[in-house]
Every structure is written in structure tokens, then in C-alpha cells.
Amino acid sequence: MDKTLLQANDEVEAALAEGRPVVALESTIITHGMPYPANLETALGVEAVVRENGAVPATIALVSGTLRVGLDVADLEGLAAAKDVVKASGRDLAAVMVRKGSAGTTVSATMRLAALAGIPVFATGGVGGVHRGAEQTFDISADLTELGQTGTTVVCAGVKSILDIPKTLEFLETQRVPVIAYRSDDFPAFFTRSSGEKADHRLDTPEEIAAAMLLHQRMGSGTGILVANPIPEADSLDPAFIDGTIAAAVKEADAKGIARKELTPFLLARINELSQGRSLTANIALVRNNAALAARIAGAHARLRRA
């Protein structure tokens, strides 16, 4: 880790030095993904889940111009309550650092910073993808291109169902990114367990995924791996209900001319309102589920590296 660029807290630094499992966590879920105080409660809860499953949590963010790997409670509280925090993709980091700003890091930014810190496993809710209507707008998330060039394994609940899922899977194939569904033949759709699309591969244990990670790296593939972990059955939403809710939110965003970085936060907030909080409850459940799996994968990966 370049300590002149990244500042890790003592717990994360010690774990990395000793080869113990660490799980990177993003911070836009805190700054832009959920309302206060659910965002803070979720951030603290997800870190606790990582610990319960045998790994050290490393929430990543930009705080007052400094790239931080591992945050304390005061940092998390500050990010959760702040009103002027930037949503930073990888391309934004340097400019925000120069002006000493703070930012929640997106999947693409967190992947890159996790790789720089030497953390191979990252847990999030859902990754970005190809937006509906991309054939006109060319709106494709930087998360996908980052997966194509940064060797981080990302554990998620698929891609957000506000996106064009078939086009997203096609783009990931073009980027040479392996898509592995955990204990499922189907690719999940964030709030629901199946998108109707098949995943490229199925693996059923954290140990199998960790072994695939090592082999992928040994071959010099140079890309990340997307692990799609379906939302628990008890927490999934009815597909017809959530699809109708999403369609209504997308139509409203189009009417208001909302696009680019503002689109996903608007849609998630509006979907939560239209679903009377059911989507937020599902979101929290799937993030915790992903954190638990990521911690188990990180533990298996650490054991294999020591073997």
C-alpha cells in the first residue's frame, strides 16, 4: 500500500500485514444510497456482519481530501449526516482530493482503491450497469469498465433492476469479466432472486469462489470477478410489484430530465417512497447478506494463499 496516497486505520493495516481476511466496503451507500439514519445503521451493521463472519471490514471513502481505508464510528457518522458530500467515481477522486473535499466512493472507485490497498474482496449492494435507453444516451456505468481492468472480486446482489440487465451482461462479457452466481443458475436482479437471465457460471461454496479467484489471477487475466449473490428468499420482493414501481420511477425521472450521476440516487429514493419503504428493507437485507458471503470468501482466500 502506498501510504502517501492511502491512509488505512490500524486494524486494517495490521490485518493486511498479517495476511488476515479483509473485506472492502463502499461508501456511496452511506452518502447517496439511503436516507439518514438508515444509512448509518446499515453501515455499522454491515461492518458487524463482516466481523461476525471472520474478516476485518474496511469501509473506503474520501474524507477531507484523504483517501481512507477503514473508518471509525465518528467518520461514518460524519458521512451519514453530511449534506455536501460528493459521489465519486474513480475519475473524480484526484480533483476532489485537490480541493480537500469529502466523497462517498462508488463501486468503481472502491474497487480501484481496494486493489491499491491490497484487498482482493469487496462487498456492495448492486453494481452499476448499462442504463435503459443506452442505445441513445450511451449511459454505461464506469463500474463495468473498472471490472474489466481491476482485479477485485465484487460480491453483489446482481445489478440494480433499474438497469438493462441483458445489455449489462453482454457488456461484462465484452470486458472479459467472469460472472459467477452463488448457489444459483440465474443471475439475480437486486430486489429479486432472478432476472430471467442465466449466469455464466455457478459455484456453491466460498472455497470454490476463492479457488477461482486465485486461478484467475495466476493466469494474468487482469479483470475483476463479479459474484452474484441472490437476495435471501425471505427478503425478496414480488417481481411484478417491484418492476411496476421501477417503471413508474424511471418514467418520472425521464419527465424531470434527471440523468447521469443523479439518476441512480433519485430512482432508489423514489422507489423507496413508492414501495412504502419495502425496497429499503430489502436493500439493507441484501447488503448484509453480501457482506457475510464476502467475508467467508475472504477467509477462504486467505487460507488458500497461506497453504
Image (tube, helix red, strand yellow):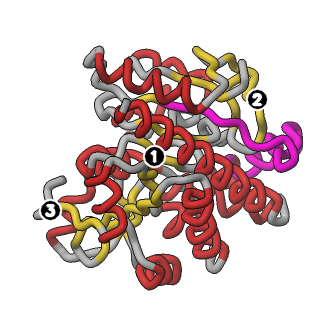
Query: Relative to residue 167, is residue 95 depicted above or below?
Result: below
As shown in the figure, which amino acid type bears the numbered disc 2? Ser
Residue at screen point 26% across, 78% down: 64
Numbered disc 2: secondary structure: strand
* Secondary structure, magenta segment, majority class: helix
Which residue is under mark 3?
3
Mark 2 or 3, which is nearer the eye? 3
Per the rendered image, the range of residues in magenta is 226-250
Residue situated in front as seen by the camera: 56 or 65: 56
As shown in the figure, which amino acid type bears the numbered disc 1? Phe
Residue situated in front as seen by the camera: 252 or 300: 300
Which residue is under mark 1?
122
Query: Relative to residue 174, is residue 210 depicted above or below?
Result: below
Which residue is under mark 2?
194
Numbered disc 3: secondary structure: loop
- Is residue 266 visible from the viewing direction of this image? no
Residue 158 appears in which quarter of the rendering? top right
